Image: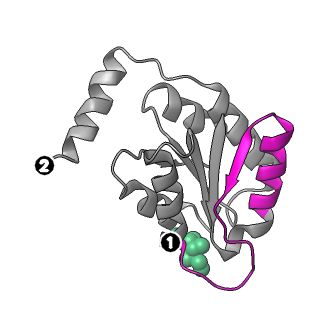
Amino acid sequence: MRIAVGNDHTAVEMKQEICKFLKEKGYEVLNLGTDTNESCDYPVYGEKVGRAVADGEADLGIAICGTGVGISLAANKVKGIRACVCSEPYTAKLSRMHNDSNVLAFGARVIGVEMAKMITEEWLSAEFEGGRHQRRVDLIMDIEKR
Ligand code: RB5
């Protein structure tokens, strides 16, 4: 499985740790940057992650900025993307099981690396349950058509 990872300047070290973690777990990583601490604009990287997933270049995406909010808002503007900001594993797991989230976002200024790894692991190991949740996800995606 290939995971697209994107981040702004606040999250370079966090991104590196998460990429290492993902590779150790056997995932293929598509690093979309940024890779320097020079100030940059999180919408650029949120869109990159969203497009990589929406275009099928990656199966899922991880987007990291200071809070996870800005970069998830940007990713969610790409058609087909359901990005969720998660600061703990329960929400991350349920965002896959009930909401079929395809981009996980978190904040490098909000949580530590070990929490980020735990969140990532729970998110990646959970599966969408379908059924009544499919109907609700379809209703969300219908909004894009209006
Ligand atoms: C950058 O200072 C910060 O605004 C950004 O990383 C993010 O937290 C935005 O939502």
Asked which colour scheme the image uses, the reply is: one colour
- N-terminal of the pair, mark 2 or mark 1, is 1
Quadrant of residue 124 within the rendered picture: top right
Name the one closer to the observer, 29 or 74.
29
The amino acid type found where label 2 is placed reads Arg
The amino acid type found where label 1 is placed reads Val
Quadrant of residue 67 within the rendered picture: bottom right
User: Residue lying furthest top in this view?
Assistant: 131
The x, y position of residue 98, in whole percent, is 44, 27
Q: Which residues are magenta?
A: 14-42
Q: CA distance from mark 2 to mark 1?
A: 25 Å
The residue depicted at 54 percent of the width and 46 percent of the height is 57
Tell whether position 6 is magenta: no
The x, y position of residue 37, in whole percent, is 74, 80
Name the one closer to the observer, 50 or 65.
50
Q: Which mark is residue 141?
A: none
**Mark 2 secondary-structure assignment:** loop
Name the residue tied to disc 1. 44
Q: Which mark is residue 146?
A: 2
